[in-house]
Image (cartoon, rainbow, N blue to C red):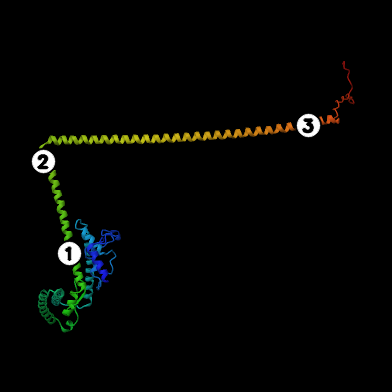
Amino acid sequence: MSAQEQMRAMLDELMGTARDGDRSRYKVKFDDPRVCKSFLLSCCPHDILSSTRMDLGECPKIHDLALRADYDQASRGKDYYYDIDAMEHLQSFIADCDRKTELAKRRLKETQEELSEEANTKAEIIHQLGESMGTLLAKAEGLGQDGEVEESMNYMDQVEDLKRKKALAETEFRNSMPASSYQQQKLRVCEVCSAYLGIHDNDRRLADHFGGKLHLGFITIRDKLEDLKKSVADRRAQREKEREEQKLKREEREKEEDEKREKNPSRSRSRSRGDSRDRRRRSRSRDRRSRSRSRKKKTRHSSRSRSRERRRKKHRRSRSRSRRSRSRSRSRSRRSRSRSHKRKRSKRTRSRSGSRSQNVKEEVRNGSHSPVPPAAAAPPPQPVEGVEEKPSGE
């Protein structure tokens, strides 16, 4: 990270997202579910254990120093209950680590030779002395780097006392078991960070382990988890107290009301009568409302049915009118067609008769017209053979 990026991160951490006066630059706010709530409380394991043997990688949620500054400012006036989310996150992480330590202990029991109870107790004492000595050495080195020389020298005196005690415990442990088994490396699992430690580790090795980033990171995570548990427990206790106080207030009010009723039974009776009357009025008003609703529904239904019938009648009338108009138009067209046909026929007959009369007149003028001869007289009937004629007198 360059110097410019470091300065930018410091400004974001101090002033938040609106340090440049532009709030639209950050589309995500601290109350977004994609933001890591453990990071807002400075206890995310992904950041604490980065670049260690148990590095968890990048957190899947958003980490931004500006959002943390916004949360610090907003949490002064309102409680967002993010400590509960962070506590649940750390609880799941620590439970997973404790599970790993138990597995490591089982593997050591399977691989290493079993010791007697006396040897186990002495080995446990040696481990405890080495752990306390390593923690004190780490604290002394930190104070020396910060410039507090006197306190670091006090811690170093305590370390020297622990060294003497550890040397005595090691001699007792060596005398209590054979040399062949003592020369073997006896490992132990660290209860804090689940790392392997040995009985024969020197001071420098113990100081490096207990002052290392992994062990100190687990210490910070566990301490933060304990603080969150205490805060959540205090909050729950406060809520329970408030609920109990509210219950007591309600009970006191009910007692006062009961005492007033006992002292003034007429008022209680009148109140009960008034309540019954109010209930009757409410029931009557409900009945009236239900009746009016049913009437409105009926009227709506009847109006709808009437409107439907009217629409149907109008539709039928329009159909009949359209049919009549169609039939009239058809009859008119037929009449017009017949009239035109008759006119055409009369015109044809007139033209034919006129042409005939003209031809006759021309023939008469020319003299070629011969009058029609009169009808010839019918010949007398001839007698039929074999039939005698009878006299007319007979």
Please provide percent x and percent y for residue 42: 21, 65
Residue tagged by mark 2? 259
The label nearer to you, 1 versus 2, is 1
Residue, x 14% and y 50% (percent of image)?
245
Please provide percent x and percent y for residue 195: 21, 74
Residue 356 marker: 3
- Which amino acid is tagged 1? Glu
Label 3 Cα crowd, 10 Å radius (few <14 / some 14-19 / many 20+): few
**Of 325 and 16, the residue lying toward us:** 16
Q: Quadrant of the C terminus?
A: top right
> How far, Cα to Cα, is label 2 from label 3?
138 Å
- Which amino acid is tagged 3? Arg
Of all residues, the one furthest to the bottom in this rendering is 179
Residue 282 visible somewhere in the drawing: yes
Toward which corner of the image does residue 43 lie, by quadrant? bottom left
Q: Is residue 173 left or right of residue 308?
A: left
Of all residues, the one furthest to the top in this rendering is 393
Residue, x 69% and y 34% (percent of image)?
344
Please provide percent x and percent y for residue 104: 23, 73
Local secondary structure at mark 1: helix
* 255 in relation to 173, above or below: above
- Which amino acid is tagged 2? Glu
> How far, Cα to Cα, is label 3 from label 1?
139 Å
Q: Mark 3 or mark 1: which comes first in sequence? A: 1
Residue, x 47% and y 34% (percent of image)?
314
Local secondary structure at mark 3: helix
> How far, Cα to Cα, is label 1 from label 2?
49 Å
Residue 226 marker: 1
